[in-house]
Image (spheres, helix red, strand yellow):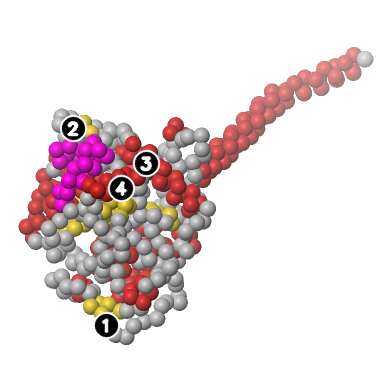
Amino acid sequence: MIRFSNGLMGSLNMEKKWVFPLVISSLVCIFLLATSLNMGLVSSLHTINSFFSIFPSRVSTNQTDPTFVETKVSQSPPPPFGSTIPRFAYLVSGSRGDLEKLWRTLQALYHPLNQYVVHLDLESPTEERLELASRVGKDPIFAKVGNVHMITKANMVTYRGPTMVANTLHACAILLKRSKEWDWFINLSASDYPLVTQDDLLYTFSRLNRNVNFIEHTSRLGWKEGQRAMPLIIDPGLYLSKKSDVFWVSPKRTLPTAYKLFTGSAWMVLSRSFVEFVIWGWDNLPRTLLMYYTNFVSSPEGYFQTVICNVPEYVQTAVNHDLHYIAWDNPPRQHPHTLSLNDTDKMIASNAAFARKFKQNDPVLDKIDMDLLGRKNGSFTPGGWCSGKPTCSKVGDPTKLKPGPGAQRLRSLVARLTLSAQLGQNQCK
């Protein structure tokens, strides 16, 4: 019995030696398992949030905000949703006599987080281009932040010709080279003007999928099929140093069968991912279409639309709107209706971010400055970044946003448009 008891006690002592390591091992396994499950849950919640959240919950209503499906193409990975304020990269371009309009538009659009390229084409007098360069160089805010760049070697840009597309691509390439941080490219002319502040725009886009493209488009060419797609034109701006209108050559050509043509607005908000695709062209389609549109009437109204709608990975990112308010006469003419004070209510009701086109120093611009932008005395549009006296004479905290009523208007429009896109309505059709 004594021998048995000693054996039993020895066995128990041996088991006790294994208890502590066993407990420790079990705790470690449980910890790792819990961590794994927790990370999976966080990842899942993040994914769900990425797909179904556009705006911060603190401004959401009882109605669930719509969203947009993330594209498969992600050559430039977007930052996590809601983690950072987005950045915009602007091209603001003009021609002869547009210096003052361009300068006013630039000041109304300015924000330290964004990037800007300004361009007065080769038709502009040398004096105007030198004056613009001088203003950009001498502005203390521009000099301090360093985010405004002028294309000093001016391009020849012909209305309705491919040189306008080439100029846009040139600006895109410059912006890609200058900064890796911007998220959307916006092209505007000196005749455009914002209807919301940059704080409104940045705030509205802060929870939007970084791959979304706002680009008006349709495959229903209508009269454009016979008057734009089939005729062949030559743009003298490709080889002459003086501006001359496009001219037609014979014979006409048939519609392409290798891809489907689309048309729409020449003004757009394009994701960085799509801009990289067009500029770098790891698929040959952007280059092929660029050559095709070299002889196309009004190629700026078709090139980008045809590219995006013929690449399956980008089709789902196309939202069918240019975020502009543009009024056309009835019947439509070659150029849109010039906006005035009589159009103010319609502009505001459109909830658009921009409007065109305006005459220089038209009273409606002063009303927009006063009622919508809070801009005074020809200064920058006030925002959370502004510091110093007078207002906006110094750069404070660029990440501080003060969205106003314009953010609510734009939010309403973007929510409706992205819901339509999510449901596959009017996308590349």
- For label 3, the residue is 409
Q: Reply above or below: 312 against 206.
A: below
Which of the 4 image quadrants contains residue 217? bottom left
Which of the 4 image quadrants contains residue 392? top left
Mark 4, mark 1: which one is toward the viewer?
A: 4
Q: Residue at x 72, y 23 (%)?
A: 19
Q: Hey, which residue is sitting farthest right in the picture?
A: 1
Q: Which residues are magenta?
A: 360-382
Q: Mark yes or no: residue 178 visible.
A: no
- For label 2, the residue is 391
Would you say the residues marked 4 and 2 are in contact, meaning their CB atoms lie under 8 Å apart?
Answer: no
- For label 4, the residue is 347
Q: Could you tell me how far apart the alpha carbons at marks 4 and 2 are, in whole angstroms? A: 27 Å
Would you say the residues marked 2 and 1 are in contact, meaning their CB atoms lie under 8 Å apart?
Answer: no
Q: Earlier in the sequence, mark 4 or mark 2?
A: 4
> Where in the figure is residue 309, as x and y percent of width and height?
44, 64
- For label 1, the residue is 249
Instruction: Determine crowd level at label 4: few under 14, some 14-19, many 20+ residues with C-alpha closer than 10 A.
Output: many
Task: Determine the secondary structure under disc 2.
Answer: loop
Q: Residue at x 15, y 56 (%)?
A: 98
What amino acid is labelled 3 in the image? Arg
What amino acid is labelled 1 in the image? Val
> Where in the figure is residue 124, as x and y percent of width and height?
12, 61
Mark 3, mark 1: which one is toward the viewer?
A: 3
Residue 217 lies left or right of residue 371; in this view the side is right
Q: Earlier in the sequence, mark 3 or mark 2?
A: 2
Q: Could you tell me how far apart the alpha carbons at marks 3 and 1 are, in whole angstroms? A: 47 Å
